[in-house]
């Protein structure tokens, strides 16, 4: 078995760790940490920070030379590229907001001549024009390289069969992972999302071992397998699932792991930063390693924009360090998380991000109380009788109804007599979100499912 690792010693280590060429076991307890690029992944902090400064300086020079948007921002601040001497100086740079990407659409932030552009992705958002995200050839390759690190970090090898159940096309989710999986040498099945019958057929006939899927589709797919009487542990070869693109809770992870018989690895990314592969879990699954040779992370207070210390939850701000076609400085992701600075037992020195608990713009204000949809999901997924889908509906002036699908098992076709369960869910939710919602129990499989990112909130309020 050959797992690519550029260094001879690293390769030897990987070969020994892999059991002298035997296929690796899927149980994370038994995976010995492996590296795609051991030198970079375990680099000492001070060398890593020096590399960040060097790359940040190059990025700032690049945008100061060729991006009018940043030229103007620098001029407003009286900032010259040469002023940037250390990581602390990062704070002198301007933020880039979602609105700036839309305002400069389509090509306002491009930093290379047109002939160097190799790929376009877009991020749709909910309103208005999309954001256009350009890649140079080197950007495409770098994105794949980071994905290769993520795959190998979870124990994937060229023996794996990777079923990519994300949307192909303008969305970065599927294509970027596809290229990374090919780099590792996996057999890639570009299945795309939806059509569960076809997905199952592919899994059965080609013995897929790794899935890439959104949490909402994973939950739905688990129900589908159940309805077909398939026991994934016995009948399928799937062992791992890379899950991301939308927020989900630990409870949901556990539910998916149990129902699909896989190890779930949390995968975080965003189109503005290449798509997936920004941060990813190792076998310890305690936070996602952020590839700090490619990105600088800051956590700020979303209201005041002031920096927050490691361990404090706030808005993640990211700066690209290697992007050629479209470098972005201090991007306000709106994602709420915190940085874990403690070393990870896997040996990687790149700091970890905690699970994203929501987006600052996802926050609902109901009767004056701030609520994140993930708080509701966390409560629901811990109730055994609850199925795998839910919907939060806001109506009238400020009324919240949580529609909750019941689990298949134990459901006798009626919901009317489940008053006790309904009251229990109301009470558990009230304890978590500090306001009393209505709860409507609905039969399994009756709430809408989307092929792409799940829509968890319908806001019909007259506010
Ligand atoms: O969703 C890229 C991606 C694809 C990541 C596949 C992981 C897997 P966008 O469409 O630009 O790109 O959406 C980015 O999705 O700012 C988060 O709000 C959310 N998100 C992505 N991954 C996670 C995750 C892709 N693991 C936005 N947990 C981000 C929570 C996530 N939220």
Image (spheres, rainbow, N blue to C red):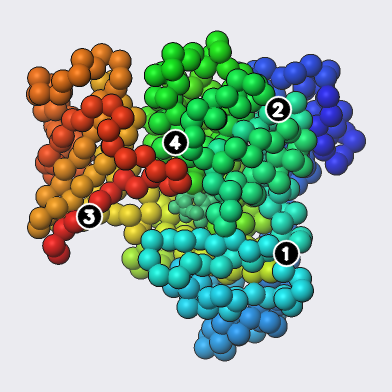
Mark 1 falls on what kind of element?
strand
Does residue 5 appear to the left or right of 328 in the view shown? right
Query: Is the residue under label 3 in contact with that under label 2 (CB below 8 Å)?
Result: no
Query: Is the residue under label 3 in contact with that under label 4 (CB below 8 Å)?
Result: no
Mark 4 or mark 3: name the one nearer the start of the chain.
4
Q: Is residue 245 visible?
A: yes
Residue picked out by circle 2: 160
Which percent across, then down, holds residue 82?
A: 70, 80
In the image, is residue 110 above or below residue 404?
below
Residue picked out by circle 1: 118
Q: Quadrant where the C terminus lies? A: bottom left
Task: Determine crowd level at label 4: few under 14, some 14-19, many 20+ residues with C-alpha closer than 10 A.
Answer: many
Mark 1 or mark 3: name the one nearer the start of the chain.
1
Which percent across, then down, holds residue 164?
A: 60, 38
Dot 3 beta carbon under 8 Å from ligand 1 = no
- Mark-to-mark CA distance, 4 and 2: 21 Å
Residue 217 is labelled as 4
Query: Is the residue under label 3 in contact with that under label 1 (CB below 8 Å)?
Result: no
Mark 4 or mark 2: name the one nearer the start of the chain.
2
- Mark-to-mark CA distance, 1 and 4: 31 Å
Mark 2 falls on what kind of element?
loop
Quadrant of the rendered structure where residue 357 is? top left
Which percent across, then down, holds residue 187?
A: 73, 32
Residue picked out by circle 3: 459
In the image, is residue 58 above or below residue 338?
below
């Amino acid at each position: 078995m050959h797992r690519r690792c550029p260094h001879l010693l690293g390769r030897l280590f990987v070969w020994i760790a892999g059991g002298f060429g035997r296929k690796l076991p899927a149980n994370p307890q038994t995976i010995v940490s492996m590296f795609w690029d051991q030198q970079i992944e375990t680099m000492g902090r001070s060398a890593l920070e020096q590399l960040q400064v060097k790359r940040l300086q190059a990025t700032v020079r690049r945008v100061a030379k060729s991006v009018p948007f940043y030229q103007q921002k620098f001029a407003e601040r009286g900032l010259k590229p040469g002023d940037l001497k250390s990581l602390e100086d990062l704070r002198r740079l301007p933020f880039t907001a979602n609105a700036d990407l839309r305002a400069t659409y389509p090509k306002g932030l491009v930093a290379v001549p047109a002939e160097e552009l190799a790929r376009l992705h877009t991020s749709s958002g909910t309103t208005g024009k999309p954001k256009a995200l350009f890649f140079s050839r080197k950007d495409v390759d770098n994105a794949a390289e980071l994905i290769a690190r993520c795959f190998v970090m979870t124990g994937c090898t060229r023996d794996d069969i990777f079923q990519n159940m994300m949307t192909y096309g303008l969305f970065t989710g599927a294509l970027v992972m596809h290229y990374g999986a090919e780099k590792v040498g996996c057999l890639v099945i570009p299945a795309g999302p939806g059509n569960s019958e076809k997905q199952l057929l592919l899994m059965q006939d080609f013995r897929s071992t790794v899935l890439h899927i959104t949490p909402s589709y994973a939950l739905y797919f688990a129900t589908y397998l159940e309805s077909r009487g398939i026991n994934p542990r016995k009948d399928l070869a799937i062992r791992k699932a890379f899950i991301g693109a939308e927020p989900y809770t630990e409870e949901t992870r556990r539910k998916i792991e149990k129902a699909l018989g896989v190890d779930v690895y949390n995968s975080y990314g965003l189109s503005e930063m290449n798509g997936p592969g920004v941060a990813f879990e190792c076998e310890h699954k305690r936070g996602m390693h952020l590839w700090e040779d490619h990105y600088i992370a800051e956590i700020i207070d979303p209201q005041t924009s002031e920096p927050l210390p490691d361990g404090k939850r706030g808005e993640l701000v990211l700066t690209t360090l290697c992007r050629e076609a479209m470098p972005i400085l201090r991007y306000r992701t709106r994602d709420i998380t915190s940085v874990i600075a403690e070393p990870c037992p896997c040996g990687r020195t790149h700091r970890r991000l905690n699970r994203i608990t929501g987006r600052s713009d996802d926050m609902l204000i109901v009767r004056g109380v701030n609520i994140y949809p993930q708080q509701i999901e966390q409560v629901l997924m811990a109730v055994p009788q609850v199925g795998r889908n839910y919907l939060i509906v806001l109506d009238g002036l400020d009324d919240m109804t949580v529609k909750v699908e019941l689990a298949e098992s134990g459901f006798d076709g009626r919901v009317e007599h489940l008053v006790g369960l309904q009251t229990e869910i109301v009470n558990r939710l009230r304890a978590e979100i500090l306001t009393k919602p209505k709860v409507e129990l609905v039969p399994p499989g009756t709430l809408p499912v989307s092929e792409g990112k799940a829509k968890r909130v319908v806001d019909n309020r007259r506010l």
